[in-house]
Amino acid sequence: MRAQLRRRLEMAERVREFLRAHNTDGVGQGLGLAKLEELLERAKVLAEQQVVGVAVTRRATRHRNEVRRALQSKILRYLRVVGRVAAKQNGELADEFPLPPRKATHEALLTAARATLEKATARQDVFVSLGMSQKVLDDLARAVSEFERTLEASRAGRREHAGASADLEAIGAAIAEQVKLLDGVVQYQFGDDVELMGAWASARNVLGPFKPKEQQQSPGEGGSQTPKAA
């Protein structure tokens, strides 16, 4: 979540608490507060969806890296050796099982692994006669399947994250508009109460609550924070 959006949501929570604490003659409970609470609840769901999307993508990436290492360093390398041994009896097999470059793309590696699985399965009788275990092909088939699943999981995680992020941006904009509406309500209801208006200004400050002037640091002590409305 972007820092600006996070600050806006935090501001909306402060505004909600202000309205809960101070009665606005029913307006804050209907047109204002209820709508704001609805937006905040939606934002909470979307934020969780965003986190899930990131977690799914990271988990898929870790698993894919493990499967990739097994494919490149063990399974495909082993079948390449078996193919070269078999080529002594059948020259066609000499270059049937090329080893993809270590930096091959995921799709290139997957394509090579699929092709190797197809060709090795067609020649498995020859390979088994040379001492290769059937387990090697089973391991390759499983690795190809897992690799495919990790790619799809990454795509799904990114879609989840991107969709939630876009919706959160829209929610953030809607919250800003709602707080502007609520500002009119609060100004009408409490405009003559200096203390409450100061608390309201602090609550709706996107950068966070600010201190009254008498409590702010002097420039020599680090300066003060300028309030910024939603």
Image (tube, rainbow, N blue to C red):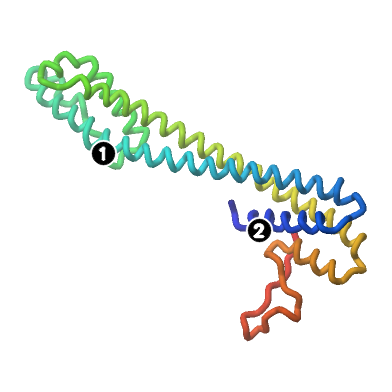
Residue 222 in which image quadrant: bottom right
Q: Position of residue 151 (x, y in %)?
A: 42, 33
Q: Position of residue 143 (x, y in %)?
A: 31, 29
Q: Position of residue 39 (x, y in %)?
A: 73, 45
**Would you call the spot at circle 1 few (<14 residues within 10 Å), some (14-19), or many (20 or more)?**
few
**Would you call the spot at circle 2 few (<14 residues within 10 Å), some (14-19), or many (20 or more)?**
some
- Whichever of labels 1 and 2 marks the residue nearer the N terminus, that label is 2
Quadrant in the picture for the C terminus:
bottom right
Q: Position of residue 37 (x, y in %)?
A: 76, 47
Instruction: Give the Cα separation between the discs numbered 1 and 2.
Output: 46 Å
User: Which residue is outermost to the bottom?
Assistant: 220
Q: Is residue 214 left or right of residue 7?
A: right
- Callouts 1 and 2 close, C-beta under 8 Å: no
On the image, numbered disc 1 is attached to which residue?
101
Query: At 38% across and 41% down in the image, what residue appears?
Result: 62
Query: At 92% across and 68% down in the image, what residue appears?
Result: 192
Q: Which labelled disc corresponds to residue 190?
A: none
Q: Three-letter amino acid code at disc 2?
A: Arg
Residue 42 vertical placement versus 176 (above, below): above
Q: Nearer the viewer, residue 221 or 155?
A: 221
SS at mark 1 in the image: loop
Query: At 19% across and 16% down in the image, what residue appears?
Result: 124
Q: Nearer the viewer, mark 1 or mark 2?
A: 2
On the image, numbered disc 2 is attached to which residue?
7
Residue 229 vertical placement versus 220 (above, below): above
Q: Three-letter amino acid code at disc 1?
A: Pro
Q: Nearer the viewer, residue 210 or 21?
A: 21
SS at mark 2 in the image: helix
